[in-house]
Amino acid sequence: MTQTILETRGISKSFGSLKASDSVSIDLRAGEIHAVIGPNGAGKSTLIHQICGGLRPDAGQVLLQGQDVTALSTAARARKGLGRTFQISALAMEDSVLENVMLGALGASGRPWRFLAPVMGDRALRDRAEAALERVGLQDNRQTRTAALSHGQRRQLEVAVALTLDPRAFVMDEPMAGLGAEGSKTLTGFLDGLRDQAPILLVEHDMDAVFALADRISVLVYGRIIATGSVDDIRTNPEVRDAYLGESA
Ligand SMILES: Nc1ncnc2c1ncn2[C@@H]1O[C@H](COP(=O)(O)OP(=O)(O)OP(=O)(O)O)[C@@H](O)[C@H]1O
């Protein structure tokens, strides 16, 4: 049986009278990309925040490799192997590519730090950072100022930062946002190969990317999952077509 790496069990979250998550159960299995799609305001970000620790569910649990992490902070979940990339980049734009990954590796080590300079001389951290950069194909850009990277390369750099924590699962919030057609295609190819490293829970509006990448898709509407299935299941599901995809799928 395929191993479940990340799971929510009946998580619910209300804002006043609005049920942004309504008993959401979703699982991410080893080796897969599981996409979450849905119209604006369906509750995708709310779901991601509860999985990553930014929001506490009113009810239900989040499990990482079978362990209940619902009460843990974002940082504690990250140390347990939840690799997150953000809709809005958290990179230090004036620092070099390598410096960004080194800081990530330092965070992973759990050691306190005050100044970047001594950190850059730490051989073990540097090796870890270099390996992550190589894994995402940015080794030739290590000295580049992060602001000079393309949007797509920044996404790859975020993944490199996440890799320093040796993630068991990735959670990605709209990685294609802001990329042109060419950039989306390149990043799609990159994410395709990344699922072997760790499975990916992917929130994404770009349907070309979703249909190209997803092993399974869950459709969220008004805080509820109305369907989970393969690309073909979802494309041909009449309820999904009515609620979200329209006739273009
Ligand atoms: N902190 C909050 N306080 C009050 N309402 C909120 C809060 N966060 C989200 N909501 C509401 O919850 C619902 C779900 O929002 P959410 O951002 O999770 O949807 P989404 O599917 O991520 O949307 P989008 O695709 O536009 O990013 C929306 O109606 C939103 O207005």
Image (cartoon, rainbow, N blue to C red):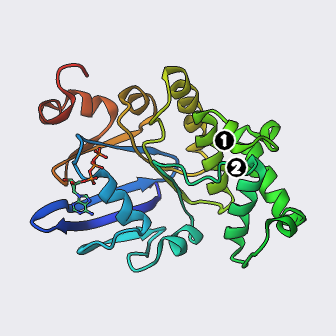
For image coordinates 85% across by 62% down, the residue present is 120
Pointer 1: residues within 10 angstroms few (<14), some, or many (20+)?
A: some
For image coordinates 65% across by 61% down, the residue present is 166
| Secondary structure state at the residue bearing disc 2 | loop
The image quadrant where one finds ligand 1 is: bottom left
Tell whether 56 sits left or right of 167. Answer: left
Judging by the rendered image, the residue that carries numbered circle 2 is 94
The residue closer to the viewer here, 121 or 77, is 121
Task: Assess whether mark 2 and mark 1 are in contact (beta carbons under 8 angstroms).
Answer: yes
Marks counted in the figure total 2
Judging by the rendered image, the residue that carries numbered circle 1 is 147
Tell whether 40 sits left or right of 187. Answer: left
User: In which image quadrant can residue 243 be found?
Assistant: top left
Pointer 2: residues within 10 angstroms few (<14), some, or many (20+)?
A: few
- Where is residue 83 drawn, in percent x and y? 55, 58
Tell whether 89 sits left or right of 130. Answer: left
Disc 1 marks a residue whose amino acid type is Ala
| Secondary structure state at the residue bearing disc 1 | helix
Tell me the number on the disc at residue 77: none
